[in-house]
Image: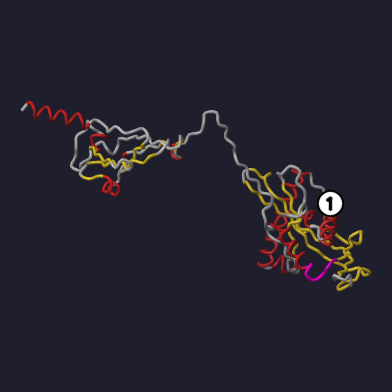
Amino acid sequence: MALSRFYAMRRFQRSFQTPHLPSEYSISFGSFHKTDAIYSHFPCNLFTPRSSSHFLSSGLEGFVLRRSIVSCSCMISSILCPDAARDGSGFTSRSSTKVAEFTICFSGSRSMSSVKAPAGARQVALKVTMLSPGFVYEPYKPREPISFWRRWFTRSGWRRTKEDLIMEMKSAYAINRLRKVAGYSKKLFYQHTLRLYKEINTLLAKGDTSSLRKVVTEKMYSTLKNELKRRESMWSSVHWELIEPVVSVRTLRARMIALDKNDLDKAFIQMTLEITAKQRFEAYNAKGAVVSGDKTKEVLVRDIWVLERSLFHPGADWRLCARLSV
């Protein structure tokens, strides 16, 4: 009787002891793998019914030492919760809430799940800035003229009048924001527009794409570059000349594209302008012969350009955003 109690107490004591493993082997459920130094933690809730059927058999956890081909087993319940009462499933009643933490070594570094930033590390925020919206907001289209009687004495005329007033209010608001943030002056703006108009057309005639990139948006640069490739396949060189002063410059539409509704200064302004000017044009082939145009004749050209400017980039300037065909 005393001997049976002794063996029972010995088995009970052994159930609380974890197997001693060499330091060169890592611990993982189901197998030992020789590693160096990685640290990770395995909680008890990883033992799902699907995974437990693979690793556990009758409440026993198998550990396999692959290098030495040594296997041993121990009661998973005695490792996790030795002091709790058993239930009918073979696990302890508290095994689902306790966490069995095992340290696995590998290359002296921790796994991604347990990596912590050093105490003195400095956080660097990534700032992304939009240089251009990449589209024209409400592109300009000429409105069909209507008579005075139709505008004021028909329902369709009233709706048309309402739409026209809304469009004019949008333009006035955009110009007002531009004046408040960047100091808009109509005279100076038109002078700058004509300089930009002449510069861009001159660069196009020379085929200078590197300088062209600075005065147009990214999307417009791609469009002009493709146009130059098509032109070079037909003509070797061109001559372009602007006859000054120009005939007329007028604003057709102004629009504001806000990026943040809480900060209206973070926005882009798009101005649609009609430029009417006399020009001279002549194109040559590879041999220098004239194949198109005549530089001795003046041609009246009407262009509709959309210029764009940022209100929140330091040192921002007007750039060509689009050319409209109406």
- Specify the farthest residue to the front: 68
Q: Position of residue 108 (x, y in %)?
A: 45, 34
Q: Quadrant of the C terminus?
A: bottom right
Quadrant in which residue 153 is drawn: bottom right
Residue where numbered disc 1 is placed: 192
Q: Secondary structure at mark 1?
A: helix
Q: Position of residue 96 (x, y in %)?
A: 28, 39
Image point 78% across, 62% down: which residue?
Answer: 304
Quadrant in which residue 229 is drawn: bottom right
As shown in the figure, which amino acid type bears the numbered disc 1?
A: His
120 over 312 or under it: above or below: above
291 over 245 or under it: above or below: below
Q: Dot 1, how many residues are within 10 Å of its Cα: few (below 14), some (14-19), or many (20+)?
A: few
In the rendered structure, the answer to whether residue 20 lies left or right of residue 86 reads right
The stretch of residues the image draws in magenta is 231-237
- Specify the farthest residue to the bottom: 291
Q: Is residue 232 magenta?
A: yes
Q: Position of residue 258 (x, y in %)?
A: 66, 49
Q: How is the image coloured?
A: secondary structure
Image point 90% across, 71% down: which residue?
Answer: 294
Q: Position of residue 63 (x, y in %)?
A: 28, 41
160 over 85 or under it: above or below: below
Q: Is residue 306 magenta?
A: no
